[in-house]
Image: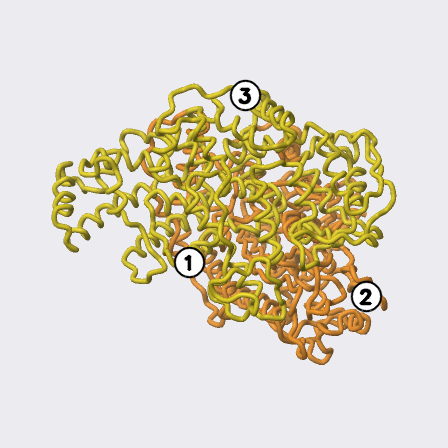
Chain colours: A orange, B yellow
Amino acid sequence: MKRRSFIRNASAFAIPALFGGVHVTANAAQRMASLINEDSDRVLVLIDMNGGNDGLNSFVPMDMYDNLYNARPNVIIPEKRLIPLTDTISLHPEMEGIKNLYDNANLKVIQGVGYPNQNRSHFRSADIWNSGSDADVFDSTGWIGRYLDDLYPGFPEDYPNSEQDHPFAITLGKSISGTCQGEESNFSLAIIDTDNIGGLNTGIEGEATDGYYGQELAYLIDTFKKTNAYAAPVTEAVEKGESLYASYPETKLASQLQVVAKMISGGLKTKIYVLKLGGFDTHADQVVDGDPTKGQHADLISDISASIDAFQQDIKALGLEKRVLGMTFSEFGRKIKSNAGFGTDHGTAAPMMIFGDCVNPGIIGANPEIAPEVDIEEGVAMQYDFRSVYGSVLMDWFEVPEEKVKNLLTPDFQYIPILGECLIPNSTDSLDDRIGLTASPNPFINNFAIHIDLHEKAKVKIDISDVQGRLIKNIGYRTLAAGLHNINIESQDLDNGIYFARIQIGNKSKSIRLVKIAN
Amino acid sequence: MLEKFTGEWNFQRAAHLLRRTTYGPRKHFIKEALDLGLDASIDKLLSTPEPTDLPIYIDFDQDPEAGIGETWVNKPIDSSIQGIFFSRGKTTWPWLYRNMHRDGFNIVNKLSMFWHNHFAISGDIGPNFNWNYISLLRDYSLGNFRELTKKITISKSMLVFLNGNENVAAEPNENYARELLELFTIGKGPLVAEGDYTNYTEKDIAAFAKALTGWSPWVSDTTEGRFRTWAHDKGEKQLSHRFDNQVIQNEEDQEYKTVVDIIFQKDEVAHYISRRLFTWFVNYDIDAEVEANIIAPMAQIILENDYEIKPAIKALLSSAYFYREDIIGCMIKNPLDYLMSLTNPVEVPFPEDIILNYEAWLWWHWDLDKMGFQIFKLPSVAGWPAYYQDPIFYRDWINSASLAIRKKMVDKFDFLYSNTDPTLQGFDFIKFIATLDNPTDVNALIQESCDILFPKALSPEYLDFFKHALLDGLPDFEWNVEYTAYLQDPTEEKRRAVENKLRDLFHTMYAIPEFQLS
């Protein structure tokens, strides 16, 4: 029954590897890890569309519409009722909010996300999505949990403490999230009712007793205390926090997202929020007989769409848009063919949505191919492994080096440029806006160039560092005239991953974030 | 040989036996076990349970097959009737809780839940199928593991859950064969070569899947699935060296029995099920010592008895290890255990009227659901994580949200006491303390309540802690004065005064971390 995960061993070696093989103690590693993430006041909001969302009725591939119609005539939405998004993709009529996000360049859609050897059991597939494991690996830790384990080795011992006094992750709902399961403990604090957190009676701590009874009692006492300790900052943040958007839909998901907005604006330092909307398992009555624009799926996708849109508007109104990124996921898509019950059965890949001000907006991946004759079992083919999406978010949003991402998720990880411009680390002594700094191509494969636009002559120091702040290339000082300068950087020798090109004039600097990807 | 317990048979140990094998033992059962002694107590626990009544409709009058108050079991289900699945399905839960509440001195309910966790199913499988499944587990709970596995293999619920209906000769579906090996019988060993998990290989999964082709759950007139010969693979199925290169020949609808028989030829099956039983009844830590001294002898007993499970359970529950000081109380209660530990020892009254009774249990059911404990809807095919998820195991039940719900459940029972709705009733502590040996003495009152409610002796400081909750700093004798005054002249006013204080006392007992342990 010992189901020790393979990751346990992998992550034990991951820390020394990060520091170039130099032995560091756990404490030193922890301090350095927190230095790496110094500017990481970033928040990731995960929304689990539980049950298996029908991607084909959400982002409808218009170039395949006729074949899709043949495969699912009783559930497909009439063409004229859809909301056109791009030349080849239209949205479900209930997805006005998503259209709005897209129009504001706040949405990234990744088509055809799944994994090899799709398991069509809900629970198994949800476990796989939570853990980020291969389809045939039973791993009890979650992908976020492993990431946090790596940052905060030793959790839950000694937490919360004076430096880390807020919960690392929060689940709005009845249970902690599998995504946040670490080796020893789950990182998420589950909250159903923000008025009812903590207040547990920790009893009398007698002398600690040895043996199993003593161990379990000690665990309980610790959990009681932790719940009480984490409750205070959460309650305080909810009280202090604001919500500036008045038109959230009246749904549970929307109200939970509003609580998240309040927690973030109230100063809670939690990195991960996990929310869940269930009901996407639309085997029957996905659409109403006679009006496919109505039905279970319409209600659910409307909730998702309007709630996310409201949340994003709130986050913008609160001025938090550079700090908050959201992502939806679902254990699988539906089959291409519908069934006789006006529903669809468990399928394969489906689109994922990533939203926020910092996304690299647009749609990545081709429309699913729908053949004129579709097999009864056929689902949407996979284009991107979900772990490549997770890993790219970890790389771009939490600045996890690529090697580590591979360690945490899969050696087959492939970087997807999910995030856009606003990710350059903030620097208080930044150069002013009259000095331009861009780079191309970005992401790059071999070499890249940085483009420096000066309004006056200056002596510019240029260097390239990696995500841990290590100097990789020192280009040195160049005295440059006013105007645009292109400086080519030889980079074949660099490993894949994130880098920063930095220019310094006097004691002020500016940097740009670059990503090297595999050829 | 499993070392037998030879120590003193006392109240705490008798209570431990009942806490681990029944739901929320009451004082009179503990006393009975104390009087019976260890062996006779175990015999009573393992005796054939009373037959139960059958689940009934409580609020659904649209089914021509059965009306309100009548059972729907074994009656055809007309899926065109709106709400029929939900209305049948929801009554199986209160039926189960009601049994757990009533069957005080028998292992059957806890053992049925063991098997449910072992042969986990989940999802919207349907009330009739689930009824067949749970009654099979109940009937076989103390029976033969191999025969139960055969029954489960062609049970409709399992055929639905693990895609047996999609397992056809032209396109075998390996879901069930994989879990049959990995989780239900022999367990997955270390990966020693590509596709070789020590106890079996990928080739065996594929071969067994083929041997199991042809079964469909979609049949209405039997409790088992239906065999369709057209969907059955008639070829030879070649097993790997892990199963001695045996070849399974076509045996049509009897072939599944051969599959199970072949797997059960391997002694590892007995070890695997012994570990599962140990995790359910004793503790989660199976170290080398437990492997050698508990699991191996249990497996031996199982093999000697040709996979009859009863002798091994008897040996486990009589073992010295089971009564180790640190094993008593080391198990965090699952949500159902927690609920029953609130309702049963202090005897929360549940309505005599069967429909009201079901409604009352159903009310609590949703709290269990909120805490991740929903019978028939397990989180995965591996069962509840508390019984397999290394390293957290039983601790999986405890988090900030579940603790908030556990806390709130106590408040609800309390609130219900003043409720006038006959369905839902709350704690009646006055009635409970009247059953104690010496309730007029505050120290005895607290001590005896603790012996019933907590698995282990609490640290001595708790006596004052609880006394303070009851008396708020008044001297001890004031309890005697107040309580005696009420007994002599039980006016409403006096009753309320005493009851309020008792509520403070028991609330404090339910609130402390020790109460989460069993």
Three-letter amino acid code at disc 3?
A: Leu
- Count neighbours of disc 3 (C-alpha within 10 A) and say few if under 14, some if 14 to 19, many if 20 or more: many
Mark linked to residue A277: none
Which quadrant holds the N terminus of chain A? top right
Residue where numbered disc 3 is placed = B2
Q: CA distance from mark 2 to mark 1?
A: 55 Å
Q: Chain of mark 2?
A: A
Quick check: B376 left or right of A461? left
- Relative image position of residue B18 (x, y in whole percent): 42, 35
Q: Chain of mark 1?
A: B
Viewer-proximal residue among A235 and B510: B510
Q: Secondary structure at mark 2?
A: loop
Q: Secondary structure at mark 3?
A: loop
Q: Nearer the viewer, mark 1 or mark 3?
A: 1
- Relative image position of residue B485 (x, y in whole percent): 12, 46
Mark linked to residue B354: 1
